[in-house]
Image (cartoon, helix red, strand yellow):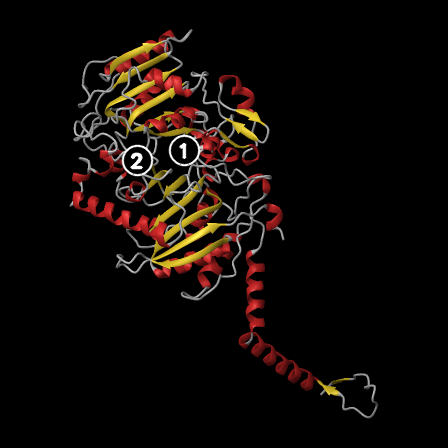
Amino acid sequence: MGHVNLPPTRRGGPQRPWTLLDIVSAAFFAGVLVFFVLIFTSLGDSLAASGRRALARSSPSDPRQRERILALIDSRPSGSSGGSGAVVEACPAEEVDNMPCEDPRRNSQLSRDMNYYRERHCPVPGEEPVCLVPPPKGYRVPVQWPESLHKIWHDNMPYGKIAERKGHQGWMKEEGSYFTFPGGGTMFPDGAEPYIAKLGQFIPINTGQLRTALDMGCGVASFGGFLIKEDIMTLSFAPRDSHKSQIQFALERGIPAFVAMLGTRRLPFPAHSFDLVHCSRCLIPFTAHNGTYLIEVDRLLRPGGYLVISGPPVQWVKQDKEWGDLQGMVRALCYELIAVDGNTAIWKKPSGNSCLPNQNEFGLDLCSDTDDPSEAWYFKLKKCISKSSLVEEIAVGSISKWPQRLSKPSARVSLMKNGIDVFEADARRWARRVAFYKRSLGVKLGTPHIRNVMDMNAFFGGFAAALVSDPVWVMNVVPARKPLTLGIIYDRGLIGVYHDWCEAFSTYPRTYDLIHAAGINSLIRDSTTGNNRCHLVDIMVEMDRMLRPEGTAVIRDSPEVIDKVARIAHAIRWTVQVHGSEPESRNGEKILVATKTFWTLSSASH
C-alpha cells in the first residue's frame, strides 16, 4: 500500500510513516467528534442558526428568496421555541413607497381605455420580492391626532408637488419641518369648514341622519377630515397619480382614505353603502360610456341619500353639453334636484326603488334578478341599475340615526340565518375582547398613540363598534371569499372595503397604527379545498408594509397558527408577546401582540 512521508518531529527519533489508512481513520474520528459537538452543544445551535440566516439572506429581487424563507419557516417543528432562523431583508431604498398592486412601472404598460391602467393590477403570485419596505430618510413617529389634521412631518413623505401646485388653493403648504393643511380645496379655497356649512343649508349635515360618506377624487381629504366633527365618517379615495401620494398625505393626517380608481370595475364597496357621495372637481366623466360611472355612483348611494357634485361640468364654461347630459341622466334616475349654487349641484336619491323602467334617452334599465349589487371584488361595471328587495328599509330616514344605528341590527341582518342573534352575540363578544385587550394586554387603544386602525377580518364590524368611544377610525375589511357582510357594517355607520389577503392592500406603506386579525389563517385558506392559497409570510410582510414603525399588530388564532405567526414575526423584526385569550373565551385561542420595530436602512445593514 502506498504511503505519505511526513517530516520528522522536532524531538527527533524514528517515526512510522503515515499510511493512507491512518489518514482515513483520523478523518473519520475527527468527523465523529465534530458531529457530537454540533449535536450536543450550543455551538451547534449557533452555527445552524447562522447557516439558516445566510441561506435566507439574498437579494430581495432574487426569485428564489421567497422559497428559501418559506422553507425555513415551515421546517421549524411546531411548538419549538425561538425564531426560525429566517430573516426577511429590507427592500432597496427606491421601494420606500412600494404599492405592489398600484405599481406605475407595471401599470404604465397597460391600456388607457377607461383608465384601466390606473386600477389595481397585482403581480403574479410569488413574483413580488419578499422584503420589508424601509421608511424614508429622516422619518419620525407621526404627529398624533388631532394635531395631525393640521400638520405632519415633512420628511415622512418629502413630496412637495402638491404644495407647489395647490398651495394657493389652501390644500397644503410647506412650513419648516412640517407640511401644514389650511383645510382648503380646489372648489373651496377658503376652507372646508365654510364649504361644509354652506352644504348644510341644503343637506342635514349634523342631525344624525347622515353618517357614511364617500369623497371621490379627494385630494388630501380635507373635506372628509372636517366632517369628522359632524359625526360623519367619510371614506376618501383617489388613484395613485401625478400629484404623488395624496392618499398617503390623507392617511398621515389620520383621515380615512383608500387608493382606488373608478375605471372598468365596481369600486370595492357593497350596494347602498353611503348616505352622501361627494365629488369636488373629481373630474369623473359621469355620463361617458353610456353613463356607466353615474350608474356606479347610484349603486353605492343609499336610497334617500345625497349626491353633491362641485366643479365641472356643473354650470362650467364650455361644458354645456356635459352639464345637460348629467342633468338628464339624473332625472332619468328620478333624483330630486335640491339646489344648484354656482358650480355646486345637490341631488337627493329617491327612497324607494328606482322609477325605472321608463322611457329615457340614455337606454337605462334595471339589472336582472340574478345580479347581486353588492358583489364588487374585481367585478366589471354594469350598464344597468341595481335593485334591492330592502331599499325602503335601509333608506336614509328609515334606518336609525347615528349613534343608535351602531347597535341596532339593520334589515340586511335579517337576511342571514339567525342573523339578529348572531349580530347581538358578536357585539357582546367584541366588547369583552376589546376591554381585555386594553386591560390585560397593554394595547394602547383609547390613547393618542393609535389613530388609524384596520380590522382584517371584520364580519359585522364588532371590533370597530367596540372602539366607537376611542379617538380612532377603523377600516373594516371583509374578505372577498367570505360572506358579504360589508353592507351590514355600513348600515351600522361604519366604513370598510372588500379585499383578498393573498394580494396587497390598496394603501401606501406606513399608514396604520394598529392592525387586528382574528382567525388570520382563515384569510388565506380555500374554503372548498382546505388548502392555503398563499403563505402566512405573504400576509405578514404585507401587514408590515402597512404598519407604521412602532405600530401594533394583534393576531388571534389557534395555538399552532400563533406559533407559526410568532416565528414569522421574529423574521420580520417584530417584538412579540403571546397571551392566552380572555377568560370568557372557551375556544383555546392564543393572542399575539407584536410591535413593529423602528429600523432604518443604515441600521438594517449592520
Front in this rendered view, residue 242 or 255: 255
Residue 75 image offset from top left, x and y in percent? 46, 63
Q: Position of residue 187 (x, y in %)?
A: 43, 16
Residue extending furthest bottom?
14
The tag on residue 44 is: none
Q: Relative to 63, is 557 on the left or the right?
A: left
Please determine whether, in this image, residue 464 is positioned above or below residue 564: above
Q: Nearer the viewer, residue 113 or 230?
A: 230
Image position, residue 25 (x, y; %): 64, 85
Tag 1: amino acid:
Phe
- Residue 479 seen in render: no
**How many angstroms separate mark 2 from mark 1 (CA)?**
15 Å
Mark number, residue 258 = 1
User: Crowding near pointer 1: few (<14 within 10 Å), some, many (20+)?
Assistant: many
Image coordinates of residue 209 in percent, x first then y, are: 24, 26
The quarter holding residue 337 reads top left
| Structural crowding at the residue carrying mark 2, measured as other residues with C-alpha within 10 Å and reported as few (<14), some (14–19) or many (≥20) | many
Name the residue carrying label 2. 494
Q: Earlier in the sequence, mark 2 or mark 1?
A: 1
Q: Is residue 153 visible?
A: yes
Element at label 1: strand
In which image quadrant can residue 276 be found?
Answer: top left
In this view, the mark in front (2 or 1): 2
Type of residue at label 2? Answer: Leu
What residue do we see at 20% from left, 33% from top? 370
